[in-house]
Image (tube, grey):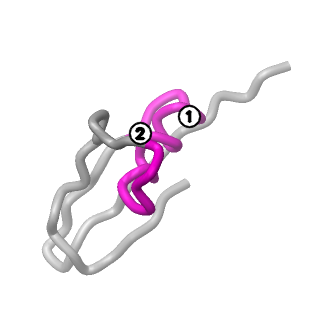
Amino acid sequence: MGVVDRSKAIPMLRTDSNGDQVRGRGLVLVDALTDQWGTELYRWGKQVWAELEERA
């Protein structure tokens, strides 16, 4: 699965966020809930993708 946008800014996993901040926790959640994730850059923007392994 993945999401795309027209920004070429590469998202960074922020580990310095505190619980009071409203923003900056999206990739922390993606990192915690997926087996792996990454970014693909395109001429027009980027895609952030994530993989979930099937578990029995």
Q: Quadrant of residue 40?
A: bottom left
Residue 43 image point, x, y percent: 13, 74
Q: Residue at x 73, y 28 (%)?
A: 54
Secondary structure beneath dot 1 equals loop
* Residue found at the very far right of the displayed protein: 56
Q: Quadrant of residue 44?
A: bottom left
State yes or no: discs 1 and 2 in contact (Cβ < 8 Å): yes
> Which residue type carries mark 2?
Trp
Residue at image x 43%, y 50%?
A: 25
| Disc 1 from disc 2: Cα separation | 7 Å
Q: Quadrant location of the N terminus?
A: bottom right
For the record, the magenta segment spans: 19-37
User: Badge 2 is on which residue?
Assistant: 37
Residue 31: x percent and y percent? 46, 35
Residue 8's disc number: none
Q: Is residue 54 above or below residue 46?
A: above
Quadrant of the image containing the C terminus:
top right
